[in-house]
Amino acid sequence: MKLNFLRKADIDFEKWDYCIHNAVNGNVYGYSWYISSMANHWGALVLGDYKAVFPLVWDRKLFGFKRLYQPFFTQQHGLYSTDVITPDLLRTFLLEAGRQFPGISICLNEQNHPIDLPGFSFQARNNYLLPLHQTYDSIRSKYSKSLRKRLKRVASRYDWIDTPCTVSELVDLYRQYQGHKLPCTDEDFRRVKGMMQTAIDRGMGKIIGLKGPDETFEVAGFFLFSHGRIINLLGTSTDVGREHFAMHSLLDRLIRQHSETHQVLDFEGSSIPSIAYFFSSFGSKNSPYYFLEYNRLPFWVKGLSNTLRRGTASNRRP
């Protein structure tokens, strides 16, 4: 089958999304509506009649040279396939991506394993997953001692509420309490608002939160539901919520609600030790994916690539 490079305008979105939906490694980040929400310029490598696809998101920040980057709030992309992904198949796609783009700084998905390919480097990134098929009591028994202690201290403080705020209110609060730590622009946050609302409209996204004794919410989060996963995409706690371990309680309530199902809670990161420890305290296990770099830019441009590199989901969490 022929491997084609297609610009966004030439992609058959219906066939594309069918491939993502049925891929052996499909995830929500690969859907056309998600990519279009988060990126201005994108295209793809497409094998045959959409048997395998590889999204390509680019900019021209390096003196006009096109460079692939990973959009904010998009943890994984890479090669998606309706058949088993072999090293040779991945090699074919990466070589073509390298031929089309002189600079690449992207995140592959967890089923795109490192291969020996000159000029390409792979760096593992953390991602913590918690299967929810067991009973809540069984899952909770694997929580860390400190987590169980904190949950006990605040057990009666919070009331669970669906849709405690709008998308705009949640993102604005996230910017207030966490977003200042990120190199995101107003445009980046405008895009994430649009993506979140689209996910909600498609039945694939939900805002949930907890409110305290004064009837105001102290923590809220946006979660994506796709391919058997509940993805912890964006969450924020007020100062009072932090003091009372509100995020601990929210995630615990979510686990209770979805226990004894075939879903997996995807904590989405992180490489920051304290946050990685927090996610692992729920009994989750690290399922790494890989950050890919390739650079055949002129020597006088290469030194700028690290400076101008866009953020990725694995390092965006405060």
Image: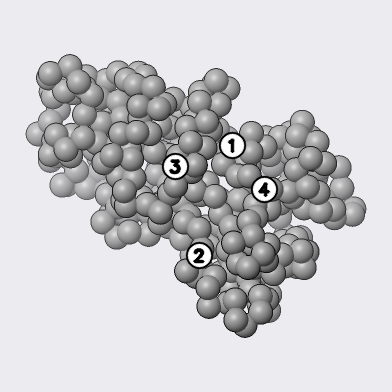
Q: Residue furthest bottom?
A: 299
The residue that disc 4 covers is 41
* Sequence order check, earlier mark of 1 and 2: 1
Q: Is residue 251 left or right of residue 102?
A: left
**Residue density around tag 2, few if under 14, some if 14–19, many if 20 or more, within 10 Å:** few
Query: Residue at horizontal 34%, vertical 33%?
Result: 172
* C-alpha span from label 3 to label 2: 17 Å
* Helix, strand or loop under label 2: helix
* C-alpha span from label 4 to label 1: 11 Å
Residue 83 visible in image = no
* Sequence order check, earlier mark of 2 and 4: 4
* Sequence order check, earlier mark of 3 and 2: 3
Q: Which of the pair 57/20 is nearer the observer?
A: 57
* C-alpha span from label 3 to label 1: 14 Å
The label shown at residue 308 is 2
The residue that disc 3 covers is 186
Q: Is residue 236 left or right of residue 218?
A: right
Task: Identify the colour scheme used.
Answer: one colour
* Helix, strand or loop under label 4: loop
* C-alpha span from label 2 to label 4: 17 Å
Q: Amino acid at mark 1?
A: Ser
Q: Specify the quadrant of the image occupied by residue 249.
A: top left
* Sequence order check, earlier mark of 3 and 1: 1
Query: Residue at horizontal 31%, vertical 48%?
Result: 180
The residue that disc 1 covers is 37
* Sequence order check, earlier mark of 3 and 4: 4
Q: Position of residue 52 (x, y in %)?
A: 76, 48
Q: Which of the pair 143/179 is nearer the observer?
A: 179
User: Of discs 3 and 4, which sits in the foreground?
Assistant: 3
Q: Which of the pair 54/316 is nearer the observer?
A: 316
Q: Residue furthest left?
A: 153
User: Of discs 1 and 2, which sits in the foreground?
Assistant: 2
